[in-house]
Image: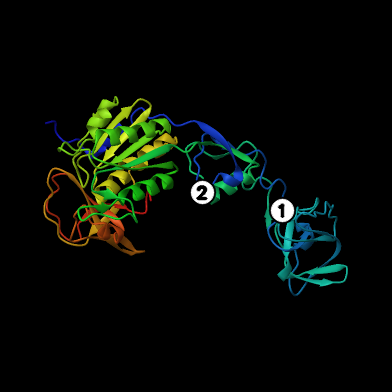
């Protein structure tokens, strides 16, 4: 039997040769959560003109150079400039224009005396403070200029990035279409939530987790339901995935080589080009990867925690690669300190469910759960991170440095 594949090599093989899915144009109002297919460049300058950063009076700096509370300078107020209702000026010697935040700076003015430093008297204003030129003014192009690169291809659009693209003048954006990820649970022992279960059956749960992960990563999840332990059921579900033009088929369970583990055989009968199927990983050793024509295939273990860990380590990066994300395979682990003693590890890379103790002035302290059975969703639900232990890691003591992967990534 071939040796187990290291986790890093398994991920590299999964991502090798992955090409992004096609691009499509969407309205800026529907772009949140999507991934850019091309760079976004500014179609306009922001702000397009110099504006006031404060409420006050637009004046010439030279006119108020000597102003103070004891020796205020009186200026004639000639107009008002408000956002959307700008006064062009000009501001001449001894003059001021009442101005509000966001309004265009009128010609001739080069500073703004804030309202708190003034006193209005009829058609005049007393300036009780002097300002240098440029004070309280946002210059044209302060944020960006026409032609500037605002966002890069492969970036995912959160609210801030959508706002930036909109400010840059874009009513639509070119984004990757959502990769189609078909999720198939397998096994005679499974029933859907709410369905009656026999004494020897359990509720299928990890398909829900993987579908949620796929959607959170930017994909469209296709629920293939549950396939029983027959070639007819499995091949029917595989055909369904191909007919739906899935970019990725994720199977749950049945990927090993037991008498009832038929998934790999069913896929092979359909033409699977098998890449690998065992990884030096805990939980999740019986991980399968291959291709079925244009469709990538990931066969995950059936144990709920194993499938979720494999989803975080392999499914999420593959979806991001299909979306053209240049950081798809990036290492998102971070340093932490161990919260209790641990024995030496064996030859598999371990991902232990753990709680975190955090404080702003130190590294998080990670407390691995006492029970790590890969069937226990209750432990996973209470966990905040996975403690990563390298193959053959020596025994470790509380306080030793370690690496963690936060569980809020990819969900």
The residue under the point 20% across, 40% down is 286
Label 2: which secondary element: loop
Q: Residues under labels 2 and 1: Cα distance?
A: 27 Å
Task: Give the mark, 2 or 1, whose residue is nearer the N terminus.
Answer: 1
Image-based side of 67 in relation to 25, left or right: right
Q: Which mark is residue 158?
A: 2
Q: Residue 35 at what x, y percent from top left?
A: 49, 40
The residue under the point 48% across, 43% down is 156
Question: Which residue is nearer to you in this view: 362 or 277?
Answer: 277
Q: Residue 151 at what x, y percent from top left?
A: 54, 40
Q: Residue 271 at what x, y percent from top left?
A: 29, 24
Quarter holding the N terminus is top left
Image-based side of 316 in relation to 65, left or right: left
Would you call the spot at circle 2 few (<14 residues within 10 Å), some (14-19), or many (20 or more)?
few
Circle nearer the viewer, 2 or 1: 2
Q: Residue 403 at what x, y percent from top left?
A: 26, 51
Question: Which residue is nearer to you in this view: 24 or 94?
Answer: 24
Label 1: which secondary element: strand
Image-based side of 51 in relation to 344, left or right: right
Question: Which residue is nearer to you in this view: 364 or 301?
Answer: 301
Which residue is disc 1 drawn over?
Answer: 51
Identify the image quadrant of residue 87: bottom right
Identify the image quadrant of residue 391: top left
């Amino acid at each position: 039997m071939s040796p187990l594949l290291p986790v890093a090599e398994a991920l590299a093989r999964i991502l090798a040769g992955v090409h992004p899915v096609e691009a499509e144009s969407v309205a800026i109002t529907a772009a949140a959560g999507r991934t850019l297919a091309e760079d976004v460049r500014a179609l306009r300058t922001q702000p397009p003109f110099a504006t006031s950063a404060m409420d006050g009076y637009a004046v010439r700096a030279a006119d108020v150079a000597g102003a103070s509370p004891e020796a205020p300078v009186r200026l004639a107020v000639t107009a008002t400039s408000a956002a959307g209702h700008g006064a062009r000026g000009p501001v001449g010697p001894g003059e001021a224009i009442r101005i509000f935040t966001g309004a265009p700076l009128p010609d001739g003015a080069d500073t703004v005396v804030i309202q708190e430093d003034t006193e209005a008297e009829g058609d005049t204003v007393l300036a009780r403070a002097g300002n240098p030129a440029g004070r309280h003014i946002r210059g044209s192009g302060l944020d960006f200029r026409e032609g500037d690169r605002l966002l890069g291809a492969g970036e995912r659009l959160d609210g801030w990035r959508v706002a930036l693209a909109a400010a840059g003048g874009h009513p639509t954006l070119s984004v990757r279409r959502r990769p189609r990820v078909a999720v198939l649970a397998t096994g005679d022992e499974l029933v859907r939530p709410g369905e009656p279960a026999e004494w020897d059956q359990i509720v299928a749960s990890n398909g829900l987790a993987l579908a949620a992960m796929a959607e959170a990563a930017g994909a469209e999840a296709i629920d293939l339901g549950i396939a029983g332990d027959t070639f007819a059921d499995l091949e029917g579900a595989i055909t369904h995935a191909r007919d739906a033009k899935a970019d990725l088929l994720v199977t749950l369970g049945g990927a090993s080589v037991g008498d009832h583990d038929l998934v790999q055989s069913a896929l092979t009968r359909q033409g699977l080009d098998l890449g690998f199927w065992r990884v030096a990983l805990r939980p999740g050793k019986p991980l399968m990867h291959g291709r079925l024509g244009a469709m990538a295939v990931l066969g995950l273990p059936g144990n709920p925690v194993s499938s979720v860990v494999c989803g975080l380590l392999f499914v999420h990066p593959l979806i991001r690669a299909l979306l053209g994300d240049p950081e798809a395979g990036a290492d998102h682990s971070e340093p932490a300190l161990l919260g209790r003693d641990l024995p030496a590890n064996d030859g598999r890379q371990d991902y232990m469910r753990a709680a975190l103790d955090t404080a702003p002035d130190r590294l998080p302290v990670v407390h691995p759960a006492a029970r790590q059975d890969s069937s226990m969703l209750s432990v996973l639900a209470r966990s905040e991170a996975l403690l990563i232990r390298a193959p053959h890691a020596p025994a470790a003591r509380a306080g030793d440095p370690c690496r963690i992967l936060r569980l809020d990534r990819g969900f």
